[in-house]
Image (spheres, grey):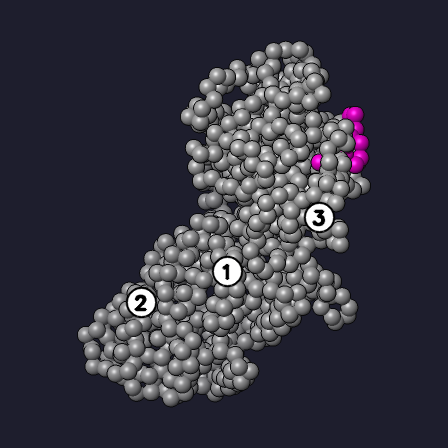
Amino acid sequence: MLYRIKLYASPRAAPPLKDDHSLEALLKYFEAVKEKYLHMKPGEVRVKVDQAGHAKIDFIDFPSGTLSNTIDTNKPVSVQAGGATIKVFVGGRDDAFFNDLPGFFRSINYAPQFYHVPHTMTDVRELPIPKTLIELEGNKLFNFDPVNPKHGQGVKLDLPKGPLTWSGKSYHKDANGNYRFVYSGKDAQAGKNINAIILEIPLAFITQSPQNDRIVNAWGESWVLKASHKVATIPDDRRPFMSRLTGWFTGLFSSKTGFEEELGQYKLVDTDGQAFADAALNEREDERQIGGNNFWLAPHFVTRLAHLGWGFGPSITALGLRTSFDHDNSPISVHRTYDSPILAFPRAKKVIFQELNMPDNKWNKKGLNIPLRRSFEIFVPNVNYIDMDTTGTWPYGRRPEDQVATRFLSLFLDMEAEINGKKYNIDMLGDQSLWDKVKIEPKTPPNPLKNDKPFLKQFPYLAEPW
Amino acid sequence: MRFLKPILIAVTAIGLSFPLVSMTDRKPGAPTAYEAELSRIQKDISDLKDGASSAPSDMEKAARYVHRIYERALLTGSYADLHAAQAAIDRAIGESGPLADLYLLKANLDFRLHRLEKADRDVQALARFAGNSQIIALKAGIAFQQGGYEEAKKGYRLAIEKNSTWDNLARLAYWESKFGDIELADKLYGQAENEISAKEMRSYAWVELERGLLEFNRGRYQKAAAHYDQADKAYSGYWLADEHRAELLGAERKFDQAVALYGRVVGRAPRPEFQQALGDLFAFMGKPDQAKPWHDAALAGYLESTARGEVHYYHHLAGFYADSRQDGAEAVKWARKDIELRQNFLTQDALAWALYRNGQFAAALETIEKALASGVKDSHLFFHAAMIHLAAGRTGEGKRLLQALSEMNPGYENFHVHR
């Protein structure tokens, strides 16, 4: 495997499309961002681990140049690079995600979480049932089953015969008139470990103008070695000496750098940029795992948000909250898909353009004039946008303790609305007191508020593995 | 340089294993790649069993168990293992119901064993997954076997559009190789290789063997050998690679080496078609006495299979009787059985050649014309067509076909097997 973390710093731009909230303007904006990203030259941190447990770490195309180090895995180390001290950790840690992933999958009727569906059968992933935050009456495929409480949380059943649809007209209510939440609030990743690459890098290593370039865009990629290049590395006594000599000589005059040559030996298999960009907006399709260059998905971003909105919007309304999605006061969630953004856009316009209120001003630690972010800025391009003048909390970066899954749902809340004299904000759905007042079971925020293991206050920040 | 307060830039959690695949050559005495993979599969099968001999009852485990049994069959090439896979699939479907995964395996197995009607029914049972690239490719494969070449090509292309996997690319490459665009076929195989990761070295080796075969079928033995070398290097100890190389050695008239290698292949993968190949090699060398026991063994294997009700050796039997035994009547009998199952250029060619061997030249001519009408450019087909035309008194067309054959494959008269 080969892992790349790409980093690109730039000044904070003035908020785009402040007054023009048209689809045409939005698509033009995406085009402009695309031009910018296609021409930028991000720095790259490249990591490969050998069988002896050493990690080769390359810092490529940074202002101070390119250099390589080899470090031990599973040990925080400091690397000197271009006069900077960079902290690096490569190895196993506690899984830092703390989401009720099965709950999210229940909300979007994602069959592979609940049923035996071959992963290659993409057409039977999200079933054509309205997405929703509260259970639909008679949605036997996905509703919580007290007889089989672990269904979807490790237990999978055969995909039933017959139509994989739903034809009800109302949300489910129990005998006490309570809705049933699709979420459980439990950490699906509790007690699990992951492999991690953790870097702490001075901004001045990434850009020569750290005073001006206050935004760092970051995304990661996983690459797997191609078979053809594994073969090339196997010593071959049969290959004539002259042939080997010719290969070496040709390599000397190749226009590609060693790093480019190396990358040609690998195949991109996954990308990580903005939280929830893949799971929620790209429908987890392999061909959409394209990281920062997700511009061709921009029209899809509009149609997908509208599709999600028809599901989540009415269920938010049913809970007595206000939604940013225009669902014509539909009393029930609707399964609707769009081929073109033209029809989808008016419905999702507010979801796309509204400013996402923060719970308080702590994020803006310097009190600068930093505008609130909007969903179209967050998801296109698919990068983690880190504002160095903030605390780096989502959507101004992403801190480990951020509950991004719940914050993602807040895109569908009407940020102009108020509750208890306070405007809706991105952490509102994580407030237990809100759920205490709603006729719903279980009375819990959708996702846990904390990780199963506390994060560390010092590098490498993620907790020790279990 | 003044550093600003550092910030945690990126925490990339990647749930993928760290250890890189081995970059070193195999040490003497170490297991070959084939042995290592077989051993892993055997261990998985053993671990997945509930008891010492019983299949797992848990559905998830049962599906994994069946997959591993099927993978073992593909790896060993043993029909006994294929039967075990079939039994495991049937049992799992009986116990767990028609899971899509299991039905897909069943469909593939039926297809592999020439049970096209069954494969078609299996695919119909997977109708709700009709848009899936694996189903599309399988349907295209069935269409190809039934002579629907354009439908097959369309299906392969659609499968690639849906999912550009190495196997879908290889399917289209095979199609192109049969219909004459060898360069395009090779390019497609090259693209297929580009999609194969270092964890799939056997798949890479398989594609290299196919590329080698493209060269072999054009008489370019050095280039074929280079691909076979690459296959061997990628995935050591693979009987399929040895089988291809044995054929090549025979074509190069390195008979001793070819015989020795075929002997090893037959020892490891005792399939009747390999026994026939070794017999054919002895016959080609002018040693009928040494050919006979291998031919006898091959025939016994073929007939045991048909006695079990299997149909996948009909084609081999037609060829065996036509070429190895020169028994036209028997050849026609088996070729007719084969063509009843699937009407395509291969079965039409086999029947025509059997009719020719039986002295029925007019019927042979009529049948071979159907095969030629497919547009397939295949040296076996052209050779048979030339002989049939000459025998039927159509000398001009016979000579033209021989000329085309020599341009297609100047080494056609050298040793080769019918695949």
Report x, y in % for residue A229.
54, 47
Q: CA distance from mark 2 to mark 3?
A: 57 Å
Q: Secondary structure at mark 1?
A: helix
Q: Residues within 10 Å of mark 1 (few under 14, many from 20)?
A: few
Q: Is residue A453 magenta?
A: yes
Question: Which one is closest to the eye, mark 1 or mark 2?
Answer: 1
> What is the chain identity of the residue bearing mark 1?
B
Type of amino acid under label 2: Ser
The reply to whether callout 3 and callout 1 are in contact (CB within 8 Å) is no
Q: Is residue A447 visible?
A: no
Q: Quadrant of residue B404?
A: bottom left
Dominant SS in magenta: loop
For label 2, the residue is B374
Over which residues does the magenta segment extend? A446-458
Q: Which amino acid type is shown beneath numbered disc 3? A: Phe
Residue bearing mark 1: B127
Q: Measuring 45% from the left and 54% from the top, which residue is drawn there? A: B159
Which mark identifies residue A144? 3
Residue closer to the observer: B188 or A132: A132
Cα separation, mark 1 vs mark 2, equals 29 Å
